[in-house]
Image (cartoon, rainbow, N blue to C red):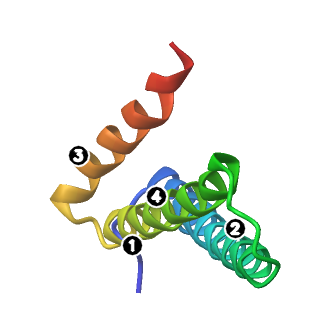
Amino acid sequence: MKSNRPIGIKILAILAIASGAIAALAGLVNLGFGITLLENLRQQNLPPSPTDHILLTAGGLNVIVGMINLLFGLGFLSLKPWAWLLGVIMQIANIRPLA
């Protein structure tokens, strides 16, 4: 059975799924390190610094962005019309901090 989707769509979808999985995994690792760090500081009766919370925030954002990229990739792979708009929004969000 021949697929109706162009090869470019398949490539973009696979790349989005892979990057989403990697970003979500990295976010979970950041969250794990952040929680471990805060727990160790609490056990030693040391106050957490603002940079300790940045690790948790970055981890949480990575998980969210990774899940959105996974959703985009799966939607793009199944040719859903909302996937294109989600991909454009995510790419604009990724470019914006560079300006």
Q: Which residue is mark 3?
A: 85
- Mark 1 Cα-neighbour bin, 10 Å: few <14, some 14–19, many ≥20: some
Tag 1 secondary structure: helix
Question: For the residue marked with disc 4, what is the amino acid?
Answer: Val
- Residue at 82 percent of width and 78 percent of height: 44
Q: Nearer the viewer, mark 2 or mark 3?
A: 2
Q: Residue 8: x and y, percent?
A: 50, 50
Mark 1–mark 3 Cα distance, whole angstroms, equals 13 Å
Mark 3–mark 4 Cα distance, whole angstroms, equals 15 Å
- Residue at 39 percent of width and 63 percent of height: 68
Number of labels in the image equals 4
- Residue at 46 percent of width and 58 percent of height: 65
Q: Residue 60: x and y, percent?
A: 51, 65
Residue 13 visible to an observer of this rendering: no
Q: Could you tell which of marks 2 and 1 lies nearer the N-terminus?
A: 2
Q: Which residue is mark 4?
A: 65
Question: For the residue marked with disc 3, what is the amino acid?
Answer: Leu
Q: Which residue is mark 1?
A: 74
Q: Which residue is mark 2?
A: 30
Q: Nearer the viewer, mark 4 or mark 1?
A: 4
For the N terminus, give its image quadrant. Answer: bottom left
Q: Could you tell which of marks 2 and 3 lies nearer the N-terminus?
A: 2
Mark 4–mark 1 Cα distance, whole angstroms, equals 14 Å
Mark 4–mark 2 Cα distance, whole angstroms, equals 14 Å
